Image (cartoon, grey):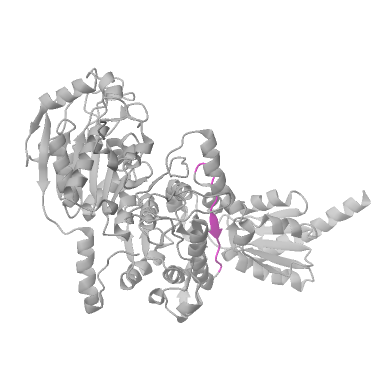
Amino acid sequence: MSRINPVNQYLRMDRMPHIWCSGCGLGTTVNCFIRAVEDCGFPLDQVAVVSGIGCTGRVAGYLKLDSFHTTHGRPIPFATGLKLANPKLKVVVISGDGDLFAIGGNHFIHAARRNMDLTVVCVNNFTYGMTGGQLTPTTPIDAISSTSPYGNFEEPFNLPFLAESAGAVYVARWTTYHVKQAAKSIREAIQKNGLSFVEIISPCPTLYGRRNKLGDGLAMMKAFKENSAIVNGADTRGVGLDFKGKIVCGKFIDREKPSFLDMYHTTMAERFGPFYESYEGVQ
Amino acid sequence: MKADPKGVLTGAHFLDGYHACCEGALSAGCRFVAGYPITPSTEVVERIAARFPSVGGMFIQMEDEIASSIAIQGAVWGGAKAMTVTSGPGLSLMMEHIGLAAMLETPCVFVDVQRSGPSTGLPTMPAQGDMMQARWGSHGDYEIIALCPNSPQECYDLTIEAFNLAEEYRVPVMMMMDECVGHMTEKVIIPKAEEIEVTPRRYTTQKPGKYLPYQAKRNEIPPMVKAGEGYRFHVTGLTHDERGYPAMNAEAHDHCVRRLVEKIRNNARRIIRIEETDTADAEVVVVSYGITSRVAGKAIQMARAEGLKVGHLRLITAWPFPERRLRTLAAHVKAFVLPELNFGQMFFELQRVIEGKAACYPVAHAGGTVHEPEVIYQRIMYAARHSRMREKKEVAR
């Protein structure tokens, strides 16, 4: 008797095979996300996924949910409009490091500042996969990319520190080796009120791994296992990533702050008094 | 469908174009606006920020125009009627998302209060320099609709019209205001809600599982769904098939893009709105739009006082352009004169359409202020004289 993968029901199987390379961490991330959505018990018809452009940008297209494949760098403002039009939705942005933090960096910090009720999952593979392996704002110093052929000399972003500083209420980092922890963190992030952020360190053996002689997908996963340390509650100032250095994983930030919509309700209720009808979306 | 009375400020008002535009959006059922401050358009969003929370609407000031122009699209897919408001430099930043709206067939409205450019130019002063970027600014093939109000009353009326057209054709609709029309204060009549016709969003009647987001025949506009209703649908800015899935080949691309273009081109006669005065026996016809149409009106009066048969064709829709009507007029009109606050945008479109069947004269102006009526008048007289001379030469030959 053939057994059907329980994950299939959450995927658009009519779109398989997917475009991702063997050894890529995106399949693992999608798996973790599905597990998280399943575990949080939220009705699936009310979950929407928004992606930008790139390898990770394709995630939205494979998930059998209301899903939006938008423009490069702009999934967060699209998700902002979607959430505000219908606050009953759980809106999750899944996109890559280049999409969210180079071209889309401004939108991320402002969504975090406003504490917009969104979950942002960044699949960080240190490179632009779709376009051939160029330098991103997370490429570590000394790493080779197709546009830093002599080694990167630009300081990369420390994403958890950036997220915390900008105002995110939940910040965690895992690698694709840490599937259970990643799924749990994504679940907690989805359940959080306000902007939650999960960074998933993911292997790109085809481009980043090959140029930097890091081996195939399996070798990169082994390196994640051996080079990572779990430090829950770590000071995010110290979790920046070096080339081949230690990867500090864990849940770093979990705090309460009123979200954008909470503040909207409070302000308008104060201003309009008994005449304020609680804003439930514009439909 | 009639307007929701909650957003309709029925009565006779003394409003400027900005406030009239905000009221038009409310009457049309718009309840989501995302914007970024830019002169000379800020008065629209300032009024929106004050008015929307009291009628169940949401205004958010985004971090830039790029974010504003896609936040409204997220809101539309969440079930809202939505718009953004900007001026030339902001519209330039929004271009990629005008393409996205065209590709996803997201009904939404972009209000552009035109100012003088290029670049920062003269932020507080009028121009009509965005006519071509509104039409062609995003890459690839697509069509949009653009409306040109020339009074605060029209800022109100055409904003409703913009939303109705956006819903009917599932396209981004551009409200091409200008600084003068925005700052001009006049009487604006807002009718009773039950007298305002509003086009509702057309949602599918198909059940989840059966619905295909882009299933449509030629010239057809597919019905929509919104997030959270169990359809588990997917949309993408990539070339897509009727399921909304990426389809990466030339044949699928032709099928996808051809309909985006044809749904507007083949319905152009239903979309186009123009206003004609004394064109039937006109020797010269002035073609104008926006604030320039009011200055042109004065120039036409002056020319008619001299006994010249001058007609006026005002573009209410700049895009689609009234090609057929202008070609018909070219059969008896000797010359067209087109004044505009730029160095030739709609003029070249006119020239293309007339194909040399009548003389075409621009009245170019860099913007910063409006034309002197005298300048347009001189051009009309010149056009009449020269086209008569040209005719005589042809007869002699």
Magenta highlight range: B139-150
Q: Nearer the viewer, residue A99 or A203?
A: A203
Q: Quadrant of residue B226?
A: bottom left
Tell me: A227 left or right of B344: left
Quarter of the picture containing the C terminus of chain A is bottom left
Identify the residue at horizontal 16%, vertical 28% (top origin): A242
Identify the residue at horizontal 51%, vertical 38% (top origin): B252
- In the displayed orientation, state which residue is furthest to the bottom: B11
Q: Is A178 above or below relative to A267?
A: above
For the question of whether residue A186 can be seen, the reply is yes
Q: Nearer the viewer, residue A161 or A195?
A: A195
Q: Is A70 above or below relative to B297?
A: above
Tell me: B351 left or right of B389: left
Quarter of the picture containing the N terminus of chain A is top left
For the question of whether residue A163 can be seen, the reply is no
Q: Nearer the viewer, residue B162 or B112?
A: B162
Q: Magenta: predominant secondary structure element?
A: loop
Q: Nearer the viewer, residue B173 or B349?
A: B173
Image spot of residue B378 (x, y percent)? 71, 62
Identify the residue at horizontal 16%, vertical 38% (top origin): A182
Magenta stretch holds residue B147 = yes
Image spot of residue B134 (x, y percent)? 52, 52
Q: Is A132 above or below relative to A158?
A: above
Identify the residue at horizontal 73%, vertical 70% (top origin): B278
- In the displayed orientation, state which residue is furthest to the front: A1
Magenta stretch holds residue A46 = no
Image spot of residue B173 (x, y percent)? 50, 57
Image spot of residue A180 (x, y percent)? 13, 37
Tell me: B386 left or right of A224: right
